Amino acid sequence: MVRFNIEKLLQKKKKSKYWLCQNMNITSRNLNRVIHGETSSISFKYLEDLCKYLDCTIDELINIDKDA
């Protein structure tokens, strides 16, 4: 299962989910669906924006849980 480290990266930057939603022009509902693994796909634009605003690489953003 793919897991996103969005909340941990936001804490590291001392930013809120609201801040991220405003910058990415995404709804809080959609962001929460990504965070909680309730979506089956994500666009490359969102991946790029997440890395840009969270100042991270794709490796820092995503973990793959092989046991799930």
Image (cartoon, grey):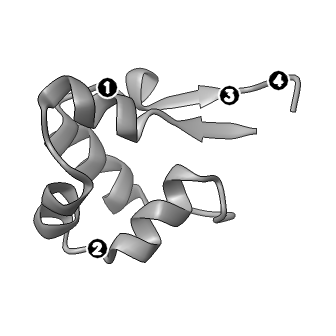
Kindly state the secondary structure of the residue where label 3 is placed.
Answer: strand
Tell me which numbered mark, 2 or 1, is placed earlier along the sequence.
2
Q: Do residues under tags 3 and 4 come within 8 Å of each other at their CB atoms? A: yes
- Residue at left offset 82%, top offset 23%: 66
CA distance separating discs 2 and 1: 20 Å
State which quarter of the image contains the N terminus. top right
Identity of the amino acid at label 1?
A: Thr
- Residue at left offset 74%, top offset 26%: 65
Tell me which numbered mark, 2 or 3, is placed earlier along the sequence.
2
Label 3 belongs to which residue? Answer: 64
Q: Position of residue 55 (x, y in %)?
A: 17, 30
The 10 Å Cα crowd at callout 4, few under 14, some 14 to 19, many 20 or more, is: few
Tell me which numbered mark, 4 or 2, is placed earlier along the sequence.
2
Label 1 belongs to which residue? Answer: 57
Instruction: Find residue 66 and name its label.
Output: 4
CA distance separating discs 3 and 1: 15 Å
Most extreme residue toward the right is: 67
Identity of the amino acid at label 3?
A: Ile
- Residue 5, image quadrant: top left
